């Protein structure tokens, strides 16, 4: 899959059209937090595992024409799915016409959606709707627990970025996150600007409500 064919906005839009509850995790979330990591070629989601939400995930996968990603089949393998079958696996590695994406129901070092959504930031998207993004602290927590060499190599840079975030105001953090989300998902026009302004207003209020008072805003846990 070439970088030019990766369209995370289309994947996110399909999830949102089906009202899927999810948190974006992993390398894509780290990029949105401006961590100095290599650009990723996929996007990872942690969906809620209720049967109703898994049914919505299944509908989104049908719309995307999602297939199981393998090393030998470039187009992936077709598979049937429903809420029950999706819930029986911890991870699904998938591909579609818009690129590669993973469903990770219980990322390493976390307890899944209900855990991650507590510190996630909700970013308004250029085309409407929102995207919940894992906090950088939770991204680090998961990568440390996973213990893969590529994750361990990234930890020092991620930690430095987390420290830098700690010196920013909540308004600055959410404004920058919204701007980067619009850029990464292809929104550069007036709609993206107005969405980001609304994101800043809502998210600043949300962050202030959750984290005041205290000096550790931006660190999450």
Image (spheres, helix red, strand yellow):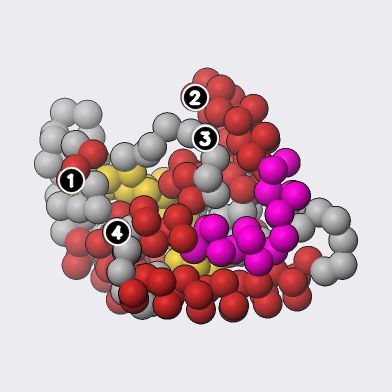
Give the extent of the magenta segment: 163-178
Picture layout, residue 99 above or below residue 153: below
Q: In the rendered structure, does residue 208 fall within the stretch colored magenta?
A: no
| Mark 2–mark 3 distance (CA, rounded to whole Å) | 14 Å
Q: Counting residues from the N terminus, which is met first, the one under dot 2 or under dot 3?
A: 3
Mark number displayed over residue 186: 4
Under circle 1, the secondary element is helix
Picture layout, residue 78 above or below residue 58: above
Q: Counting residues from the N terminus, which is met first, the one under dot 4 or under dot 1?
A: 1
Q: Is 88 displayed left or right of 210 in the figure?
A: left
Q: In the rendered structure, does residue 167 fall within the stretch colored magenta?
A: yes
| Mark 3–mark 4 distance (CA, rounded to whole Å) | 20 Å
Q: Which residue is mark 3?
A: 36
Q: Which residue is mark 2?
A: 150
Mark number displayed over residue 5: 1
Residue drawn at (53%, 68%) of the image:
122
Q: Main secondary structure of the magenta part?
A: helix
Mark number displayed over residue 136: none
Under circle 4, the secondary element is loop
Counting the numbered discs, the total is 4
Q: Counting residues from the N terminus, which is met first, the one under dot 4 or under dot 2?
A: 2
Residue drawn at (61%, 48%) of the image:
136
Q: Is 65 displayed left or right of 199 in the figure?
A: left
- Measured from the top left, where is residue 77 in percent x and y? 16, 44
Residue drawn at (31%, 40%) of the image:
41
Q: Counting residues from the N terminus, which is met first, the one under dot 3 or under dot 1?
A: 1
Q: Counting residues from the N terminus, which is met first, the one under dot 3 or under dot 4?
A: 3
- Measured from the top left, where is residue 173 in percent x and y? 62, 58
Q: Is 177 displayed left or right of 101 in the figure?
A: right
* Between marks 1 and 2 in the image, the one whose residue lies nearer the viewer: 1
Residue 66, quarter of the rendered image? bottom left
């Amino acid at each position: 899959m070439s970088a030019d064919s990766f369209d995370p906005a289309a994947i996110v839009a399909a999830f949102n059209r089906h009202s899927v509850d999810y948190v974006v995790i992993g390398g894509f979330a780290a990029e949105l937090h401006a961590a100095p990591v290599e650009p990723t070629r996929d996007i990872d989601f942690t969906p809620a595992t209720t049967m109703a939400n898994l049914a919505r995930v299944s509908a989104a996968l049908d719309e995307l024409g999602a297939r199981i990603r393998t090393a030998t089949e470039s187009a992936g393998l077709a598979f049937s799915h429903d809420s029950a079958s999706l819930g029986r696996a911890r991870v699904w590695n998938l591909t579609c016409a818009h690129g590669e994406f993973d469903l990770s129901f219980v990322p390493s070092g976390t307890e899944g959606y209900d855990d991650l959504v507590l510190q996630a930031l909700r970013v308004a998207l250029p085309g409407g709707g929102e995207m919940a993004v894992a906090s950088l602290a939770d991204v680090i927590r998961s990568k440390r627990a996973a213990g893969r060499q590529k994750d361990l190599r990234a930890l020092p840079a991620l930690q430095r970025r987390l420290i830098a975030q700690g010196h920013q105001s909540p308004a600055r953090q959410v404004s920058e996150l919204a701007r980067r989300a619009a850029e990464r998902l292809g929104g550069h026009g007036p709609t993206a600007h107005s969405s980001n302004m609304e994101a800043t207003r809502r998210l600043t209020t949300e962050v202030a409500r959750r984290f005041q008072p205290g000096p550790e805003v931006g660190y999450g846990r």
